[in-house]
Image (cartoon, coloured by chain):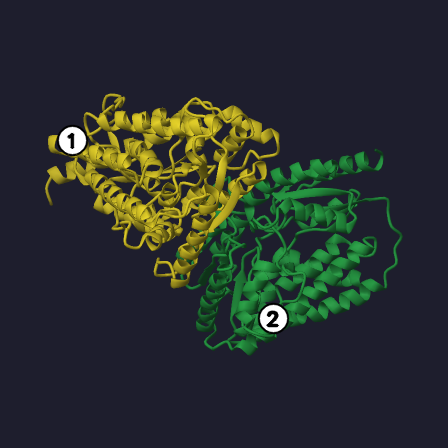
Chain colours: A green, B yellow
Amino acid sequence: MGIHEMVAQYREMLEDSPLNLVAEWKAKHPGSKVVGCYPVYTPFEIIHAAGMLPVGIIGAGNRLEIAHADSRFQSFVCSIVKSTLELGLIGNLESLDGIVFHSICDPARNLASVFKRNFPKLQVEYVHFPQNMASPHTVNYLAAEYRTLKSNYERLAGRPVTDDDLRKSIRVYNEQRKLIGQLYRMRREAPQNLSTLETYVLTRIGTLIPPEEHIGLLKEAIAAAKERDERPKDRIKVVLEGSFCEQPPLELIEGLEAAGCYILDDDFLLGWRFFKQDIPSEGDPVENLARAYLNQSVYSGVKHDTREAKSKHLIDKVRETGASAVVILAAKFCEPALFDYALYRRALEKEGIPHLYLEFEEKMWIFDKARTEVETFVESMLFD
Amino acid sequence: MAKTAEANKTNYQGQMHLLQKELMGNYFNQMTRAAEHGEGKAAYMLISGNPVELMLAFDLIPVYPEINALQLAVKKVALPFIQKAEEIGYSMDNCAYVKADVGLFLGDRKTPFATIPLPALILCNYVGCNVYLQWFEHLAEYCDGTLYNLDIPFMRDPSGKPTAADVTYVVRQLEEVIEICEKITGKKLDYAKLKRIVALSGETGEIWSRIKGLTKNVPSPFDSYFDSVTMMAPLYCLRGTEGGLKFFETALKEMQEKVDMGQGPLPEERFRFVIEGPPPWPYLRTFRDLFSKWGAVAVASTYSTVGGLWEFGFKHDSNRPLESIASHMLEWNLTNRNFLQRYEQIRRYVEEWSADALVIHSVKSCRLFSAGQGDMREYFTKELGIPTLLVESDIEDPRYFSEAQMKNRIDAFFESLEHKKIVRGAAAAGGAT
């Protein structure tokens, strides 16, 4: 199958009813358990090592009307919180046995409690990720947090998780991340041959299927993408930042590119691309996962590392990719992304890097305004 | 239609209020002296579960940007600061406490109540609120103060308690904070002094908890929302000092006298309610009067427990100062407890403080408080059958307060409560048939 066909097929699955994929998997694997993972990052390895399927529960896109959840969460709360709750309230999360939330922001944290109250059959976990990245004591804390999580998942799965199980899962996810990284690198080096939408769809499909399957699929896609040899278009090269949790609609991603951008890097689906290097699989696997979070993970709006300013990471990314501008694409009402913008803007202005600020909602349907803004921005860059 | 009480305007100026003004005046003067004459060094902290004891042990001046922000709102001067922050990239949808503070911080830091000193230490006590992390991350970018993220694991265990690893982690971090304070001040920690301060905090917390218990009386001697906020500033800024303790002793005595005389904040207490959520600081008086006119008194409030939850049995222990500070930060404050623990806290308030209703004030700025309060309303009305009103505005941004709308909602709610009361009264008078 060519890459075009692959992407078209997965896109249809994603747009249609992505949770059907999960239900299908479950039907084929009687007795198996599924754990939903709310963004941004989950240590999937722990779930996977217990023989369960971790799947991304990343909102509901723009095809679900919110009919119930907006009476529970106010108008000033972001879309993904409400759409995720809506999925539960209308019975669309029936194939999940558990769901895990993390300390990424205040609404997501309260959502964990609301889930607990409304869906007593689900095992709801909550991970407090440390925000003191500089202390030598933090690793012990996070390892203990992961051990608790592990024992809770042993209970859900009804089987123990050995260190070797974990090491095996670490290796699987290392490979998955490596291949996603390769896809991104190909796009960065020759964006005319692989679009952002394509890498997005190819990555996103992996949040819903076993990583082993995703690995096969990625290999096929990479091989197919290598066949392409398109001529570069007259577009500006940008880095996209701010969509690390709620995800923009596929049409918007597509539209940004069509409006004249090559997006050399982005922070979509960040939890599935959380480490640039492999997590060591030798030694204490739980401690390795904890150390990786503290010392190897990528920066994001939900991690506050006093060792190095976030804006420096963004500037470095721009320099390393060779982009000439930044598009900030923040989810409406996403406090972490909105706050980050103030710091990013300051740093970008200081460095003389042009940027465009846009807000989106996963539920949006109309993209004309965003597209016009991007076109104007692109023109100002191209004809400056 | 049921007749409402005369419009009651409260203007309570007891000894407690006068003493509070004096003490807080001194506190703000100390800040101004630090800012303008370099007398002393400032440590910025957040209110939630604050470890003020540790700062006092080093004679660092505790500065709370939240208190500064809310003072700006109360004095009705917050908006230009908020707008200044918005001009440099902060969003309409960001917490307005942060925006007001950033606007102030990037200017000359002069306010009608104090000049705010620059921080020597930016101690981000991350107790629940994720915005705290952003807030202090930003302040640290704008100045040279040392930033330390004191990470407090959230209450997530089904037991509602911190794990052993949580406690160890926090105590180890407190030890690191001590090292930083030693560097900043050039002084070694005086452990005996820390113990004395923690002992004072223990006594203060105990008296505060007794004061809060007094509102179980009918009538309630004070309003546990609008009057509690008067007591909250000394609780955070002066806890662990002799002056702070004296303030609470005075307040307890005064409130006990009111209980003995059967006095409350209003001429007649007609409704008792529990209130959830922070107050609308820019319109505090207006908001209060909307309840006073119905003879409605708040007998308990979740807001008064953001900095610490003392009324359910916590007391600082001077024999274990660091463990005790850790326990306060982890477990004994509202903000580090999960949303369902808050439901439980409110349920206890309604039952043990004999309330007729729950009022939820949902504020846009503080999503820690507000996100999901619709579910809370669902729980209290549908599961527990407690009349619940949800109103929306903001803690800081005056643009989100619509008085007419607020008034309509509150009037309709109490009219319906009154109606229920009359029906119940009539049924009771008619006897069991």
| Location of residue B129 in the rendering, given as x and y in whole percent from the top left corner | 45, 45
Residue at mark 2 to residue at mark 1: CA–CA distance = 66 Å
Q: Nearer the viewer, residue A31 or A348?
A: A348
Q: Is residue A204 visible?
A: yes
Chain for disc number 2: A
Q: Is residue A365 visible?
A: no
* x 64%, y 61%: residue: A275
To the question of a shared chain for discs 2 and 1, the answer is no
Image quarter for residue B350? Answer: top left
Q: Is residue A207 above or below residue B201?
A: below
Q: Amino acid at mark 1?
A: Lys
Towards the viewer: B276 or B178 = B178
Q: Amino acid at mark 2?
A: Ile
B106, above or below A246, in the image: above
x, y (%) of residue B63? 43, 35
Question: For this rendering, which residue is in front, A247 or B397?
Answer: B397
Q: Is residue B172 left or right of residue B105?
A: left
Q: Position of residue B101 (x, y in %)?
A: 50, 32
Return the chain for callout 1.
Answer: B
Say which element carries label 2.
helix
Residue that appears at 79% across and 62% down: A3
SS for dot 1: helix
Name above or below for residue A47 compared with residue B18. below
| Mark 2 residue crowding within 10 angstroms, few (<14) / some (14–19) / many (20+) | many
**Residue at label 1?**
B258
Q: Quadrant of the C terminus of chain B?
A: top left
Q: Where residue B341 sits: x, y (%)? A: 35, 52
Q: Which mark is residue A170?
A: 2
Instruction: Please indicate whether residue A171 sits to the left or right of residue A287 in the image.
Output: right
